[in-house]
Image (cartoon, rainbow, N blue to C red):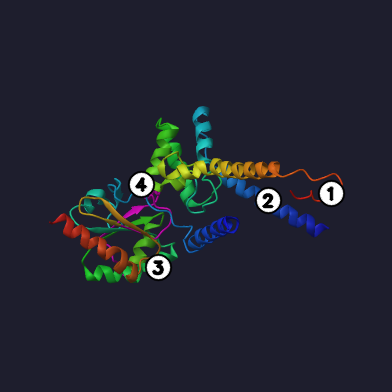
């Protein structure tokens, strides 16, 4: 029991260590800019560890990008300008929610298209079922003709 | 007839999509810089911090820009290849020493040989962001007018050099001097 408690204690310490590493960044002076910073860093993919945002990641590149974004915000640049800056250098993949453009249209429309295809299939099946003769009460197939 | 053909076709299509996806590298991200002007940068040089390596140094000839660091095992792997290319002398290789200790970098070049025409020190990683670098080693091919022609992410090998770089270098040279 004591070893379990000890191990959970160690694990807990390790878990909080990584949180500290991420929260270690200084806050921006302007709370509005800090809000944009928090939002933006959660939208930008860390290309080193591709399933993390740069807000989550402790990779050196993520730290550099957070610093770069902070400096651009302090220089008064807008969220859109910073996104364009990142897109110009790292490509569409850097944003978790890619912009609406020709090569991402299929990506954005796929859910709607799949829903329409599914709805179309369902509608056909329902129509075909509706056209079938109603089975008789005792479960016997209806007599032909 | 259609009752069997359509699901069969959909299945075959899915198999084809997955088969292609299986052999693609999910870590590979195409660079949006290709075909665009190389980014502005200015870095202190490794051999002499009073001097700088900057964008204008790349102009006027086809050149390579290689992003490396002593912490990067892939850079150690490709070092022999870079030396071979440098000995051949057909193209200058400019290095960007990315997030590294300059003392270690100098030691590395002394021990292993120096393939670079010049190395800029990017300790903070600012120039690397301008170049859209996300994993060393990365090697860019830059045309005489400063256009980024190609980017290779992974250690440089002679096969990559022959198949990907040489044809583009030839095209850039003949294109610039018609």
Which mark is on residue A84?
A: none
**Depth order, front residue of A128/B99:** A128
Q: Nearer the viewer, residue B47 or B119?
A: B119
Image point 29% across, 47% down: which residue? B36
Residue on which the image places disc 2: A13
Please state which of the two labelled residues, at mark 2 or mark 1, is closer to the viewer. Answer: 1
Q: Is residue A12 above or below residue B4?
A: above
Task: Give the CA distance from mark 4 to mark 3.
Answer: 24 Å
Q: Are marks 3 and 1 in contact (CB under 8 Å)?
A: no
Labels 1 & 4 near each other (Cβ < 8 A) = no
Q: Are marks 2 and 1 in contact (CB under 8 Å)?
A: no
Read off the magenta span: B113-140
- Is there one chain holding both mark 2 and mark 1? yes
Report crowding for label 3: few under 14, some 14 to 19, many 20 or more residues within 10 A (C-alpha).
some
Q: How far apart in space, not on screen, are marks 2 and 1 (Cα)?
A: 67 Å
Residue A78 in which image quadrant: top left
Residue at left offset 25%, top offset 64%: B167
Which numbered mark, 3 or 1, is in the foreground of this view? 1
Which residue has dot 4 on it?
B130
Magenta span has B119? yes
Residue B137 shown left or right of residue A1 in the figure: left
Tag 3 residue: B76
The correct choice, above or below, for B151 with respect to A104 in the image is below
Is the residue at mark 4 from the same chain as the one at mark 2? no
Q: Under tag 1, what secondary structure? A: loop
Residue A139, which numbered label? 1
In the displayed structure image, the side of residue B136 where residue B43 appears, left or right: left
**Residues at discs 4 and 3 in contact (Cβ within 8 Å):** no
Q: In x, y percent, where is residue A124?
A: 62, 43
Q: Residue at x 17, y 56 (%)?
A: B175
Residue extending furthest toward the front:
A145
| Crowding at mark 4 (Cα within 10 Å: few <14, some 14-19, many 20+) | some
């Amino acid at each position: 029991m004591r070893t379990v408690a000890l191990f959970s204690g160690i694990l807990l310490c390790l878990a909080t260590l990584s949180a500290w590493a991420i929260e270690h960044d200084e806050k921006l002076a302007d709370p509005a800019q800090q809000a944009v910073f928090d939002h933006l860093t959660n939208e930008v993919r860390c290309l080193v560890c591709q399933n993390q945002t740069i807000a989550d990641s402790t990779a050196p590149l993520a730290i550099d990008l957070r610093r770069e974004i902070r400096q651009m915000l302090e220089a008064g640049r807008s969220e859109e300008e910073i996104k364009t800056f990142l897109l110009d250098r790292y490509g569409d993949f850097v944003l978790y929610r890619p912009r609406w453009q020709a090569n991402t249209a299929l990506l954005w429309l796929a859910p709607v298209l799949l829903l329409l295809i599914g709805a179309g299939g369902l509608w056909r099946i329902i129509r075909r079922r509706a056209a079938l003769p109603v089975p008789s009460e005792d479960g016997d197939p209806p007599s032909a003709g | 007839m259609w009752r069997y053909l359509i699901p069969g076709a959909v299945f075959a299509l899915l198999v084809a999509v997955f088969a292609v996806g299986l052999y693609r590298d999910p870590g590979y991200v195409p660079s949006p810089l290709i075909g665009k002007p190389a980014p502005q940068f200015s870095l202190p040089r490794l051999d002499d911090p009073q001097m700088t390596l900057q964008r204008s140094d790349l102009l006027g000839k086809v050149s390579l820009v290689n992003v490396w660091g002593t912490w990067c095992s892939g850079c150690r792997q490709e070092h022999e290849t870079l030396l071979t290319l440098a000995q051949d002398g057909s193209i200058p290789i400019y290095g960007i020493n990315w997030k590294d200790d300059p003392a270690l970098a100098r030691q590395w070049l002394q021990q292993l040989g120096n393939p670079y025409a010049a190395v800029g020190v990017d300790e903070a990683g600012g120039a690397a962001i301008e170049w859209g670098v996300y994993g060393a080693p990365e090697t860019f091919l830059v045309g005489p007018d400063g256009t980024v022609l190609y980017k290779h992410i992974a250690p440089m090998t002679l096969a990559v050099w022959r198949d990907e770089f040489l044809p583009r270098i030839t095209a850039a040279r003949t294109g610039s001097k018609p």
